Image (cartoon, rainbow, N blue to C red):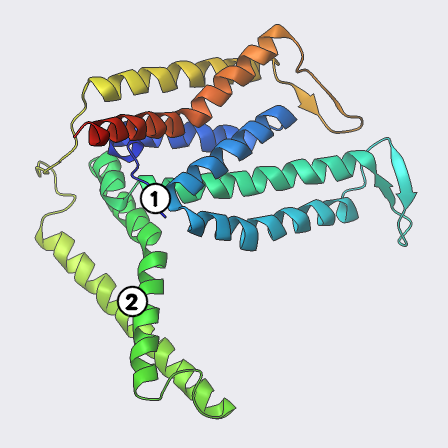
Amino acid sequence: MKNRDTFSGFHPIVNFLYFGLVIGCGMVFMHPVCLLISLVCSINYAVYLNGRKAIRFNLIYLLPMLIMTALLNPMFNHEGATILMYLPSDNPLTLESIIYGVAAAVMLITVISWFTCYNAIVTSDKFIYLFGRIIPSISLILSMALRFVPKFKMQIKSVSFSQRCIGRDVSNGSLLQRSKNAITILSIMITWVLENAIETADSMKSRGYGLPGRSAFSIYRFDKRDRNALIFFLLCGAYVITGYVLGGIYWQYFPIIFGIGSELYSISIFICYFALCIAPVIINVKEDRKWTRLRSAI
């Protein structure tokens, strides 16, 4: 069951800045503590947004991807000083390559999980609002590309259902007939995609999209709440990135595993990074409790 998300109601600049920080840091920080923080917070937020759908996605797709990536890396990466055994190909299997494979797998599924949250919060309207005047053509193309996959899935389900009603679905008939039905559905979808692209282009052109001096209506207003959140994200992001640049969360996997993490400065970076990643969940939980108290007072 989906929950009511308060963070999505913040200004698009705040939403985009937050995901830019957590996704960027998630792709760069390889310290085990940072990986764990980002993984836990991203999955927590994804489950809050999408409920059982996010849990099913994590179990069906992300967990096998984690295992596969962790297992494949030692087969191709043979760096490291701690040799555990030799593979049939006479290449060494090292402890460092195994641990690095797990870390890389965690980083991969964490970034994917953050992007699922991004797609739910930063809609195409918000993206066009942010970049429509700066890069109008590119922002429109990116917006259409981001919303193409979910629209395509919905449309192909509708077309398949309609074809099933007249006995022309991919599950009807012989193998040859099912192949013909699949080609028919594919042809319908290609026609729909082309028509949709032409209609969108004509619609945006008739509205004067991208022309200089064109005004634009916006429902977004930057208020005190957005200002406080923006300042908080900027301070946390600056502190964490500065700590990374200065080596406060340094960690290496090759040739031996070595890193910094027990110092007071490193702990402060971890706390700040956790506060940054978990902020939307805290905002939503706080608002949910407030809403519950107001409902119980009625």
In the image, farthest residue toward the top: 264
Q: Which amino acid does label 1 sit on?
A: Ala
Disc 1 from disc 2: Cα separation:
23 Å
184 or 232: which is nearer to us? Answer: 232
Residue at 34% in and 53% down: 145
Residue at 62% in and 52% down: 64
Query: Is residue 242 at all visible to an observer of this figure?
Result: yes
Mark 1 sits on what residue?
120
Mark 2 sits on what residue?
193
For mark 2, give the secondary structure.
helix
User: Which comes sooner in the sequence, label 1 or label 2?
Assistant: 1
Quadrant of the drawing holding the C terminus: top left
For mark 1, give the secondary structure.
helix
Q: What residue type is labelled 2?
A: Val
Residue 24 drawn above or below residue 140? above
- Is label 1 in contact with label 2 (beta carbons under 8 Å)? no
